[in-house]
């Protein structure tokens, strides 16, 4: 009989090294995240001390080469994201932002001096980074950003506001994207620089076990050698987003798996009308839909991971994975919530936490609508991002 928790035997598609990494991260989540994450989520906090533990495990910037990074395959990075998000989206978000949004632009576009200065400490979790792209009035259209940078002698002076910034209040550096006369440029901004303020965003109903901030830059002055020299234009931040989206398309399958497994165990033990609810046809239909969705989404993620390792993954294919896997994960979380009934809204079970977290994951790193339009352009050759276009 197939394993209900790995119906398609997807573990057989992994190498021995990949299985070891998967199992190591899974144990870390079971030991360090799951026992306390409901309390973190309820309190609206994230234990920053986990950063050094994850750094010691090689999880931060793990898919990057050199500078203290583990240099794993893209698929291994994806598997780590999947296991981390089986714990909580906030845990995976921390790793994604650190590795794909803060470390990756330095690794890809930074000078050798910048790489040597920042990446080893970031890989160890001693230095936490954040990524400043989204603004209060510029989300899905980041090219409309208002944050500006101007040269003043040998320095750059930055002004503007960034919004919805993961890790903003605990970061030592921010990768800030700003408009310059030469186009969009990336800047490494130490968060203790005069004029830099991070304001914690409160009253969230989603992704609560994660730090989310507003960044305010008022005449922030940084030296010229804090500019990322290797890129200008939107190619820089968009390439970072593609890296983060790759982690998401794996990660959400961890949240989906956790919801499915919670519903499966609950349905086999919860008695109604003299029988476990798993004996009823409508419940079995939900469990089957969840199982198929988890296996299908994980298989998609593994395929895209192999393509990335082969150098064949395009941003459009990443959008395919982010678009469909997040949608699948949300459907699975909602079905699981219905199986658990009233118990599904308590933090004694992981389902409501994952369900609300996934509402955020559905929006960040490109909304469902944006990925729909990316895929639409890919198959028609017509861009339809602006009103009246297409």
Image (cartoon, grey):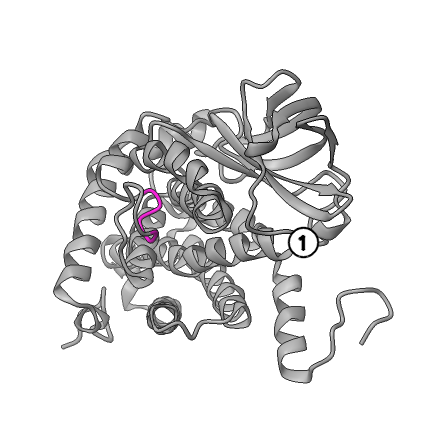
Task: Name the residue nearer the viewer: 46 or 2.
Answer: 46
Q: Position of residue 87 (x, y in %)?
A: 32, 44
Q: Position of residue 249 (x, y in %)?
A: 44, 61
Task: Name the residue nearer the viewer: 269 or 202.
Answer: 202
- Region rendered in magenta: 60-64
Image point (56%, 42%), residue name: 228
The outermost residue toward the front is 153
Residue 49 shows in this picture: yes
Magenta segment main secondary structure: loop
Where does label 1 land, which residue?
233
The quarter of the image holding the N terminus is bottom left
Q: Position of residue 263 (x, y in %)?
A: 33, 56
* Residue 252 in the image: above or below residue 36: below
Position of residue 10 in the picture relative to residue 253 (left or right): left
* Residue 53 in the image: above or below residue 88: above
Q: Position of residue 276 (x, y in %)?
A: 25, 60
Task: Name the residue nearer the viewer: 179 or 228.
Answer: 228
Residue 133 shows in this picture: no
Q: Is residue 22 magenta?
A: no
Position of residue 25 in the picture relative to residue 47 (left or right): left
């Amino acid at each position: 009989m197939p394993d209900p928790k790995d119906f398609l035997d997807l573990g057989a598609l992994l190498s021995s090294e990949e299985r070891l990494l998967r199992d190591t991260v899974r144990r870390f989540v079971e030991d360090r995240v799951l026992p306390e994450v409901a309390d973190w989520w309820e309190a609206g906090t994230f234990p920053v001390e986990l950063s050094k533990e994850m750094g010691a495990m090689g999880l931060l910037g793990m898919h990057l080469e050199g500078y203290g990074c583990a240099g794993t395959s893209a698929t291994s990075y994806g598997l780590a994201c999947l296991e981390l998000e089986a714990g909580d989206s906030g845990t995976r978000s921390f790793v994604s932002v650190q590795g794909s949004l803060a470390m990756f632009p330095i690794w890809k576009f930074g000078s050798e001096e910048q790489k040597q200065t920042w990446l080893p400490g970031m890989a160890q979790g001693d230095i936490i980074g954040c990524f400043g792209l989204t603004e209060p009035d510029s989300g899905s259209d980041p090219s409309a950003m208002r944050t500006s940078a101007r040269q003043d002698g040998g320095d750059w002076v930055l002004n503007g506001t960034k919004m919805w910034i993961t890790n903003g209040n605990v970061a030592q550096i921010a990768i800030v994207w700003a408009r310059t006369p030469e186009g969009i440029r990336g800047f490494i901004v130490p968060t203790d620089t005069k004029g830099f303020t991070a304001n914690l965003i409160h009253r969230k109903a989603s992704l609560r076990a994660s730090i989310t901030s507003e960044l305010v830059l008022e005449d922030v002055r940084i030296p010229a050698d804090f500019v990322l020299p290797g890129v200008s234009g939107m190619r820089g931040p968009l390439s970072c987003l593609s890296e983060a989206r790759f982690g998401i398309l794996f990660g959400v399958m961890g949240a989906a798996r956790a919801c499915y497994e919670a519903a499966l165990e609950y349905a086999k033990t919860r008695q109604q009308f003299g029988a476990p609810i798993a004996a009823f046809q409508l419940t079995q239909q939900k469990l089957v839909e969840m199982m198929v969705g988890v296996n299908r989404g994980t298989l998609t993620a593994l395929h895209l991971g192999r393509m990335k390792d082969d150098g064949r993954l395009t941003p459009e294919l990443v959008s395919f994975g982010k678009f469909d896997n997040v949608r699948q994960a949300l459907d699975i979380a909602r079905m699981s919530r219905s199986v658990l009934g009233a118990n599904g809204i308590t933090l004694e079970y992981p389902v409501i936490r994952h369900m609300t977290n996934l509402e955020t994951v559905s929006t960040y790193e490109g909304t469902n609508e944006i990925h729909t339009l990316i895929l639409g352009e890919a198959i028609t050759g017509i861009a339809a991002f602006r009103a009246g276009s297409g």
